[in-house]
Image (spheres, helix red, strand yellow):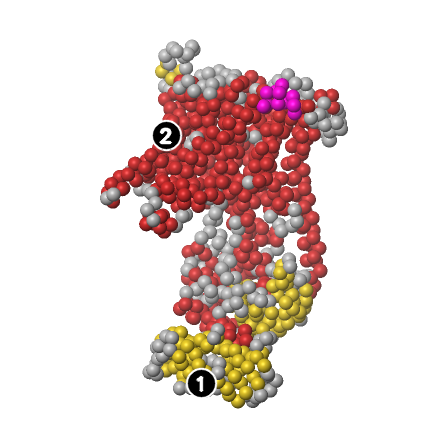
Amino acid sequence: MTVRRQRRSETFLALGLVAPAVILLSVFLIYPFFKNFTLFLYHAPPYPGLPSKWAGLSQFFDTITSTSFLDGLKATVLYTVLVVPVGVFLGLVLAVAAHQKLKGMAIYRTIFATTAVSSVAVAAIVFGTFMNPVLGLLPWLGIDTNPTILQNPTWAMFAMAIIGLWQFIGLSFILFSAGLQSLPEEVLEAAKLDGASPAKAFFTVTIPLLSPTIFYVFTVGVIAAMFTFGQMDLLVGPGAASAVHVNTLAYQIYQYVVTQPNPGVAACISIALFILTAIVTLVNFRFLERRVNYDA
Amino acid sequence: MASVAFNQVTKKFGDTSVLNGLDLEVADGEFLVLLGPSGCGKTTALRMVAGLETPTSGTLTIGGNVVNDVAPQHRDVAMVFQNYALYPHLSVAKNIEFPLRQRDVSADVRAKKVSEVAAMLGLSELLDRKPRQLSGGQRQRVALARAIVREPVCFLMDEPLSNLDATLRARTRSEIVRLQHELATTTIFVTHDQVEAMTMGDRIAVLNAGDLQQVGTPTELFENPANVFVAGFIGNPGMSLLSGGVEDSKLRIGGTETAFTGAGASGAVTVGVRIDGVQLSSSGIAAICDGVEVLGAEVHVLAHLGEDQIIVRQVASAPRPKIGEQIFVELTAEPLCFDAVTGLRVAQ
Amino acid sequence: MTPDLSVSAVAQPKRSRVRRSKIASYLVLTLGAIVVLFPLYMAIVSSLLTPVQIGQQPPLFYPPSPQWKNYGDAFVGGHLNTYLWNSVLQTLEIVVGSVLTSLFAAFAFATFQFPFKKIIWALILATLLIPFEVTIVTNYQTISSTHLLGSMWALTVPFMASAVGIFLLRQAFMAIPGEIREATILDGCGPMRYFWRVAVPLVRPQLAAFTVIAVLGAWNQYLWPLLLTSNDEAHRTLQIGLKTLNSGTFEGYGVVLAGAVIASIPMLILMVVFNRQLVRSLTGGAIK
């Protein structure tokens, strides 16, 4: 085979190998993402089969200024604020404690990682049973949540956040453990010899060296939190969600696809949520990355 | 400055013993080299002085005080790591300053000391750079500066030259020796390179597989090795070691016999000769030539007899044997004898 | 400079200070472990209680007479046997699909030059930024219109490609020294033979890591199966089955929690057995 013909056949082979993945990703991720930008310009017809009416950008602006959207925005932001910083902090604390060369560390590490492999359904159901006003644990702790915390407009979100936090701690812990293990041992020893007490060495050397990890965990946590809706669906349901202020934007997207189909509005919220997440991630990037110290 | 002393120090990791009952004294202000092949325990010994490892048994003293249980930050020793261990997120100036900050030294004194030490090591231009912007040699000097700046009682150096290229290594070698003389601080230097050890140390402690083989000045180790290991390790190239036997005041090596005046030797011995203690001749020990290395002004002839290797130095102009040719080696100097079983030197 | 005479003075405090920090660490760790394990522990305990026992105040912390029949009920009356089987099938299909497409694509990117290579790679990376949640509007329409609705494929095909997998495996393939490929060329080995016989075996660690994360992701999926199987009992997966069980007719929580335990066990086993691969895939190159 001549070199040229071989290269031709290699090209075909390569494109053939890449094709399945590219086709699937295009059909199920790229195309839908961009389709949102046409869908959101049309009002959904009252009955399926009828043509859609042009709405232009007015539908988008109406949607994002509606009370339900703003309420959902508040819910999403509140949830993120409750879950992510605490989850990052606790994951770090536990990872540091488990990093010592003490006996039984492997067991602790396995235990903390368990929440990372639990599904949202399992977590929601398990915590849901705790929160049952009659049968759960809350009465035992002396907390009266009549009728149930899940129907309490003030506290329902906290219940959701606890579930999310429990799940996030596992991942946070795993990432920080890996990060701690990859720190250069010698630099920490040098700090010891230079006279730094363990506490001082931790804050002036370990944390700066760990900053890429802290940044990564924060980013991953925020993105996951902003798209959360699983425990809301399982424990509260689409009907009651907005009443108790747990109707996160991701949940609203689901509702406008399944329970109250409205592709136009669903697309609007999808775009809005995406932009929101992109902004938050970018801000995160700028703000934290300036303080991140990547070494050579 | 302080002296450092190991007293029957042993270190075990699990069931493996890395250091066996080390007895060693480093005098105040001395430059002592811990020399040996990888795994001999030299780095472990160094790290014990730093406090990064604890002795399994035995006592370690610094300046006369037992320090087995003292934390590294309280020992007042400074270490230069093999990979420098600079703080990647701090500038050169802040790296050097770090130890002073831990000791609550005031900002003015800190700044003064940092600039002094930086000038001493030629780092004044680089103070604002980060470690990742420096070359290997520059990073090493920063590591040195960080160690010097707080005037510790002892410097510990863990193979600091091994990551430098050959020219830089030679230059840095003499710089370190000069610095040490100027500062007169006790220094313990670990290396596997015997050339470094010979050129830098006041005394050298040779270790092998956790045991101290011999400690002494470079000359002592060269001229009076205590056992076969030291004889073969020291010198460039090391001693050629041949098997032989002593019987009735006669030394037999590979078919030849010479008179043997030394006492206390009988039976099988290992004979050590240096490349300048032998010459090619028409008669003597028979060997087969394995090759000829041309080094310019001189030539090394490599040969073997049985399982032993021997190297003979010649001038470049002398006739060179061919590979496979039989040659005869004559002893021109008194060889050293070691017990074939224990490896220890027997009296001459 | 005189030797630091304070050295001997601090010899004693070091021991107790070290011990104090060890105790603090164990305390923190044990507290954390209790908090983390407590929900699962209580779930297991409650899954073995009768409805009456569950209602007890103060709550029971261990089952006096383990009600294994709760598990039986979950399987039969709660249809978890069907749902479990569906989840297994779904996970299998998704993992096999995404592993194969990722292996092929990653290999192509690492080994060949071809037109549009840079653009296609940028495309694939771009999908990493697209969360699945913003695609469901259209994907739902796509699936309904192709009449795949009501089949297993609807649940699995959208996930049979993974940018994460391609990313991880491309790195792995690129780490194979070029000389190995050259040696096989000289031996007359074609590219696909090289792929199956040499390249894939050499990237086994990363492949294992990706497989673990793919299994985890597929098994724990909630959104897409919810969308498709809320009204389709025959294809419902385990996670959505749990939701049905939760809003269902069984008395007390025992059966529901039995279902939750059943759903968790496979992933817990996975985590214990494949811990290293799991960690490796979660940190996938982001942590140096």
Badge 2 amino acid:
Ile
Residues C102 and B322: in front is: B322
Number of marks in picture: 2
User: Residue at left 37%, top 14%?
Assistant: A52
Is-magenta flag for residue C80?
yes
Badge 1 amino acid:
Gly
Residue count near mark 1 (Cα–Cα under 10 Å), binned few <14, some 14–19, many ≥20: some
Magenta residues? C71-81
Is-magenta flag for residue C284?
no
User: Residue at left 51%, top 17%?
Assistant: C232
**Residue B200 vertical placement versus C240 (above, below):** below
Q: Position of residue A22 (x, y in %)?
A: 37, 32
Residue B63 visible here? no
**Residue C250 vertical placement versus B198 (above, below):** above
Q: Which residue is mark 2?
A: A23
Which image quadrant for residue B170? bottom left
Residue count near mark 2 (Cα–Cα under 10 Å), binned few <14, some 14–19, many ≥20: few
Q: Chain of mark 2?
A: A
Q: Which residue is mark 1?
A: B284
Q: Position of residue C270 (x, y in %)?
A: 56, 37
Q: Position of residue A295 (x, y in %)?
A: 46, 51
Which quadrant does the N terminus of chain A fall into?
top left
**Residue B109 vertical placement versus A66 (above, below):** below
Secondary structure type for disc 1: loop
Q: CA distance from mark 1 to mark 2?
A: 83 Å
Residues C2 and A145: in front is: A145
From the viewer's perspective, tell me whether residue C158 is left or right of residue B266: left
